[in-house]
Image: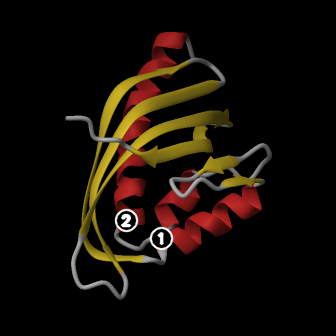
Amino acid sequence: MDNAKYLADFDAFMKKRLAASTAFVEGNFAPLKQISTERSPATIFGPQGNCIQGPEKVNAANEKGANSFELPAENDFEIMHQDADTRLAYWTGIQRSVVKIKGEANPISMELRVTEIFRREGEEWKLIHRHADNLRQTK
């Protein structure tokens, strides 16, 4: 596959990535698990300031995170830029969500600055790193 084909493949994959993200904020971890690596290295730098290393710990943290949400939810990515080659791919931008946290009466809005890195594993892209933190609003 030449580089242009990897770019096109990654662009198509990003639709699957958005769907997995939406499922996550609806309380469903399974689609994110499907696109997450099970091989080291794997990391998350979460919006609470935590740093998690290792695929088992990353996937456990993601499962716990998904379990804190419930329907209804809205979710979208504002992709500022993305790229892919034969081995690695990334996107960076803003994730905008309206989520319902279990036990809370009202939905909340979340705007996160996000950078994600993916590694080609066989014929699939796998999430190996996510850095997300709160977007600071400027006026």
Vertically, is 61 above or below 46?
below
Are dots 2 and 1 in contact, CB under 8 Å?
Answer: yes
Q: In the rendered view, does 7 fall on the left or right side of 108?
A: right
Question: Which of the image's four quarters has the C terminus?
Answer: top left
Vertically, is 115 above or below 67?
above
* Residue 66 disc label: 1
Counting other residues with Cα less than 10 Å from the Cα at mark 1, is it few (<14), some (14-19), or many (20 or more)?
A: many
Q: Please tell me which residue lies in front, 30 or 128.
A: 128
The picture quadrant where one finds residue 50 is bottom right
Give the residue at mark 2.
Answer: 25
Q: In the rendered view, does 58 fall on the left or right side of 19?
A: right
The picture quadrant where one finds residue 79 is top left
Q: In the rendered view, does 51 fall on the left or right side of 64?
A: right
* Residue 37 disc label: none
Vertically, is 94 above or below 73?
above
Q: Please tell me which residue lies in front, 110 or 43.
A: 110
